[in-house]
Image (spheres, grey):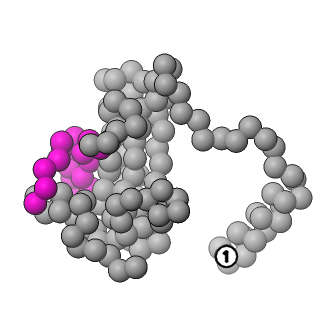
Amino acid sequence: MAYDNNNVFAQILRGEMPSYSVYEDEKTYAFMDIMPASKGHTLVVPKSEAENIFELEESYISAVAKTSKLIATAIKETLRPSGVLITQLNGSDAGQTVFHYHMHVIPVYSENPMKIHANKLEDKALLETTANEIKKGIG
């Protein structure tokens, strides 16, 4: 799928759609998610045309990570959540709905905890086999 210049985040970056700005620098823009998972849910987007992590230049990945840490720290200090979830989705089956690379910085509060870990240990042989398969792709 080719990058769509008319996706909502591209429009926000061009100033064609409104947003609730939190932070901006040369390579990133952070703004409030209008359908938040919790109070303070903030999105960090690169000022680069990339649909997913596989298309994004490394310098922008670094910039998004740096801005995400800055936002998470500000959220921790101001909103006082009990935790912060930082996540990034690639592809519709992974839950991506806007096809412009972005990071979610989601405050988690004790009255509404979010947990993504399963509660069952995986078979050790399967873990080792899968790890070896992934290592082949790093090569």
**Where 73 falls versus 32 (above or below)?**
above
Disc 1 residue type? Gly
Q: In x, y percent, where is residue 55?
A: 41, 74
Tell me if 75 is positioned left or right of 137 in this view.
Answer: left
- Quadrant into which the N terminus falls: bottom left
Q: In x, y percent, where is residue 44?
A: 32, 50
**Where 94 falls versus 6 (above or below)?**
above
Question: What element does badge 1 sit on?
Answer: helix
Viewer-nearest residue: 135 or 110: 110
Q: Quadrant of residue 102?
A: bottom left
Give the magenta-colored segment's residue range. 16-33
Q: Residue 22: say if magenta.
A: yes
Q: Residue 27: say if magenta.
A: yes
Q: In x, y percent, where is residue 127?
A: 81, 57
| Residue shown at the point (48%, 56%) measured from the top left | 95
Viewer-nearest residue: 59 or 44: 44
In the image as oriented, which residue stretches furthest toward the bottom?
2
Q: Badge 1, how many Cα within 10 Å: few under 14, some, many 20+?
A: few
In the image as oriented, which residue stretches furthest toward the right?
125
